[in-house]
Amino acid sequence: MTVKAAQLHQNDEAASRRPKLYSYRRIVVKIGSALLVDRTSGLKRDWLESLGDDIAALCANGVEVMIVSSGAIALGRTVLGLPKGSLRLEESQAAAAAGQIELAKAYAEVLSHHKLRAGQILLTLSDTEERRRYLNARATIGTLLRLKAVPVINENDTVATTEIRYGDNDRLAARVATMMSADLLILLSDIDGLYTAPPHQNPDGKFLPVVEAITPDIEAMAGAAASEYSRGGMKTKLDAGKIANAAGTAMIIASGTRLNPLAAIDKGERSTLFKASPTPVNAWKTWISGNLEPSGRLVIDEGALVALKSGKSLLAAGVREVAGQFMRGDTVAVFGPDKREAARGLIAYDASDAVKIAGRKTNEIAEILGYDARSAMIHRDDLVVRARRDTTAKE
Ligand code: GLU
């Protein structure tokens, strides 16, 4: 066997050993505009129905699925009868307004055929970059998943201007995937995966079924070309992959230009898997532990300290003292019964509410606060427990 043939054989084998989609826990599926919208006839309903079948099959296997869907502007153009060619900002925002309502309706209908509910989330850049809004967006999407609804997410194009927008849904989908700790991000577009050179420029480009890591060599393989409707070409897809992989989320690039595009991935249709980093860097936690001045302090009991050290969330029941002026989403320092700093985290309550519920059981909280609140004082995803050597530093 030649070296090349051996490599291709290895690639085929790697592709056949890939985990099936139902073996993932949480999947974000990003749908490109060109898949959903035909310039003359509008929404591609048959295709959307087939996607709905695939999503329902995953949900039935216990997978939590989130959809990041483009198509609002493309659909709005048809709905409003806007001319071909480039649109002015206010025209594309009007198109997004008219298109998004149709898009959401279509998803709700298609999913309802499987007794699934859709929940629409429109995000702006600041929703994932500002702490409070990030927490809020994450809690809302998490609640939808818990309620077995399918979040249908898009950028809030009607208000986002150039300076404050994600600009492409590939990176938005990667942000959502890392925000929700998804273990897989699937980018469906008219591109079926990564080639060693862009296939339309170089017919000798070899297809790559598995990419271990997005290195500069891999990035050099991406051309800049994008299809007519989609904003992102291979470059934004690899940018999305870098965000996702670094946080421990794998990514698949697959073509959606066939019916039942998710089932097709499992049947072995061509697609590229970008593996998650085996040592994910949790940028979120680094940021919490390192960069911020805590606005408050909590003292917790021994039981809570043990729970924290084993990776659990901090519940109100284990909190003995609350001090400082802070708001939900601010960083607080957490001290053990020995008054040594044991952890830092983003608190889920304002100081006034935290004082009221400190030491109280989870099932008492709603009654004390008068609203159905989140039970953890600090969710484990927002908590960084200090390494042992820090806590004994003074000895
Ligand atoms: N948010 C845009 C839309 O729904 C699409 C952005 C993209 O395709 O990346 O029309």
Image: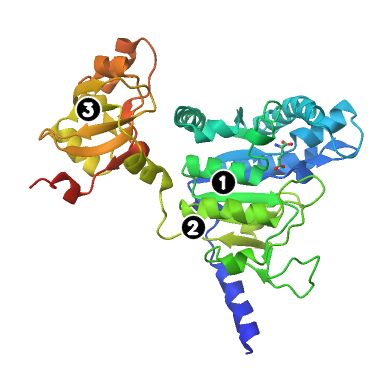
Is disc 1 placed on a helix, strand or loop?
helix
Is disc 2 placed on a helix, strand or loop?
loop
Q: Work out whether mark 2 precedes mark 3 in sequence or the reverse, and give the earlier one.
A: 2
Residue 121 picture quarter: top right
**Spot occupied by residue 315 in the image (x, y as percentages of width and height):** 26, 28
**Tag 1: amino acid:** Ala
Distance from disc 3 to disc 1, alpha carbons, whole Å, reads 34 Å
Q: Residue at x 75, y 25 (%)?
A: 97
**Spot occupied by residue 92 in the image (x, y as percentages of width and height):** 79, 31
Give the labeled residue for mark 3.
298
Distance from disc 1 to disc 2, alpha carbons, whole Å, reads 12 Å
**Spot occupied by residue 75 in the image (x, y as percentages of width and height):** 80, 33
Left or right? Give the position of 41 relative to 244.
Answer: right
Q: Are marks 3 and 1 in contact (CB under 8 Å)?
A: no
Give the label, 2 or 3, closer to the camera: 3
Q: Residue at x 16, y 44 (%)?
A: 391
**Tag 2: amino acid:** Ala
Residue 342 picture quarter: top left
Is disc 3 placed on a helix, strand or loop?
strand
Residue 79, above or below 221: above
Pick the residue in front: 308 or 331.
331
Colour setup of the view:
rainbow
Label 1: how many residues lie within 10 Å, few (<14), some (14-19) or many (20+)? many
Give the labeled residue for mark 2.
276
- How many labels were placed on the picture? 3
Left or right? Give the position of 381 relative to 156.
Answer: left
Q: Which mark is residue 174?
A: 1
Q: Are marks 2 and 3 in contact (CB under 8 Å)?
A: no
Residue 239, above or below 63: below
